[in-house]
Image: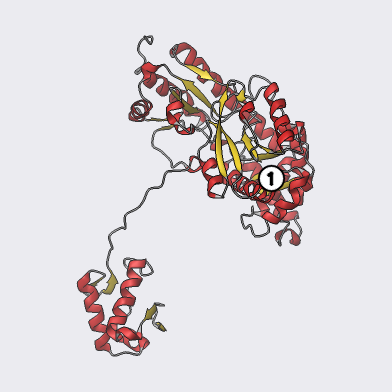
Amino acid sequence: MAVQWSRSGLDLHLQTSTGEGLRAGLEVALRDAVRSGRLPPGTRLPSSRTLASDLGVSRGTVTQALDQLVAEGYLESKPRSGLRVAPQPAPPVETPRPSHATLPAVPGIDLRSGFPDLAVFPRRQWLAATRHILRTAPNTAFGYRDRSGAVELRQALAEYLGRARGVAAAPAHIVVCAGYAHALRLVCQVLRHHAGAGSVIVFEDPTEPDYPELVEQLGHRARRLPVDDDGLIVDRLTDESAVVVTPAHQYPLGVTLSPARRVELVSWARRSGGFIVEDDYDGEFRYDRRPVGALQGMASDRVIYVGTTSKTIAPGLRLAWLVLPGGLVTPLQEATRWDESYVNVIDQLVLTRLIQTGELDRHIRHCRTRYRRRRDLLGQAVTERLPYARLSGIAAGLHAVLQLPDQAGSEASLLGHLERRGVHVEGLSPFYHQRQNAPPAIVIGYATPAEHTFRHALGTLVDALRERMPTAPG
């Protein structure tokens, strides 16, 4: 293979095969460069004289090759404009099923779950903390850091989690992760070390479907167990390696794991040797009483605690953390040995500063007041205007499940009706392993709309639902 570089004003890398003949090799190289996008539409090519000189071939050979590509539509020739790459048809795009964590933006009113109000991102506080870090941090702060995360952040998290969530955490047991999915991936690697490949990890049913899929891609087996009004039905656990639960506010149903079930779950873990993975995704946001403390405080030796800033600040930060039982610290350090999903050290130190100055607590209190008001307005609207529907679960978090009568129709037709009215919510069925097990319900995320538009968004949703439920169900 002969590799040539153009020495003209345009650096043109062409890889030609001498076995194909000079002209044919040049045609293939240019055609491949256009097809692959290395030469995008509109790119002006060197003149045939320059290209011939640079490639060490005759001008006639170059001209014949270029004429052939013009005839095939790869190049176009315009007077006084020279040769340019012609517009190419766009390749077919396969649209993957969107992950719940990366739902694309939609027109109209977005009431899908899983997102905080991004308008309240603490820009001023984040900027001030960033300036402080860049002004005061030593040069060594920007070098290679501990794979477990900046020690400053782990110390701050240990204090904050103990104070705000009742988590028993030493800095050495905390690992900073690049989001919840990264944290779960690390847990799967540790469980492979602890229990071997193919071990069973239990998830609640319903749950976010991406995560059971993730653990199966990582070589484990995912199993679902049902949830009732008291949370996960624990007595159906046997000898699985781990169970992933959302005890403070079950996602998406919104119930809490009852005190009796908490004791039962910890007893199962100690009896079986399994681990509890506690996803405390929105534990700070409880509106009818003080937030329930983390399950980890009951059994720090059996609970792997996972926290994140995705709901408290913003998902785009990709900041999460694991609090590990002592026996899993060394295996996890081995698991992160080749892991490159690091969190920007500046963002780690900025979050540290927000915790240390109390700005994180103030931000969460502000958000809690804001979201509680929206949850109250939603509950009031359902009571007054949708008498045959009801909100399930506790007053907490950033979403609620609205149980509907059969009169509302099928989930697909209801969602289509709402979308035609400009309102986007989620049906409950995709969260169930067997969709037919889902009761008629929609999941409403009330944190996303801007503050000044929330009443309008809520009114539009309720009006559209009333069109499907004009009378009492038979």
- Considering only vertical position in the picture, is 401 above or below 356? above
- Considering only vertical position in the picture, is 452 above or below 334? above
Front-most of residues 254 and 224: 224
- The amino acid type of the residue labelled 1 equals Leu
**Is 206 left, or right, of 291 in this rendering?**
left
Q: From this viewpoint, which residue is outermost toward the left?
A: 71
Front-most of residues 398 and 430: 430
| Total count of labels | 1
Residue at the spot 62% in from the left edge and 21% down from the top edge:
230
**Is 34 left, or right, of 231 in this rendering?**
left
- Across and down, in percent, residue 309 comes to 63, 40
- Considering only vertical position in the picture, is 215 above or below 413? below
Residue 149 seen by the camera:
no
Front-most of residues 287 and 2: 2
- Considering only vertical position in the picture, is 379 above or below 209? above
- Identify the image quadrant of residue 19: bottom left
- Identify the image quadrant of residue 81: bottom left
- Across and down, in percent, residue 365 comes to 66, 29
Q: From this viewpoint, which residue is outermost toward the front?
A: 239
SS label for mark 1: helix
Dot 1: within a 10 Å radius of its alpha carbon, few (fewer than 14), some, or many (20 or more) residues?
many
- Across and down, in percent, residue 423 comes to 39, 29
Residue at the spot 26% in from the left edge and 86% down from the top edge:
61
- Across and down, in percent, residue 49 comes to 30, 86
The C terminus lies in which quarter of the figure? top left
- Identify the image quadrant of residue 30: bottom left
Q: How is the image coloured?
A: secondary structure
Q: Which residue is mark 1?
A: 351
Front-most of residues 281 and 348: 281
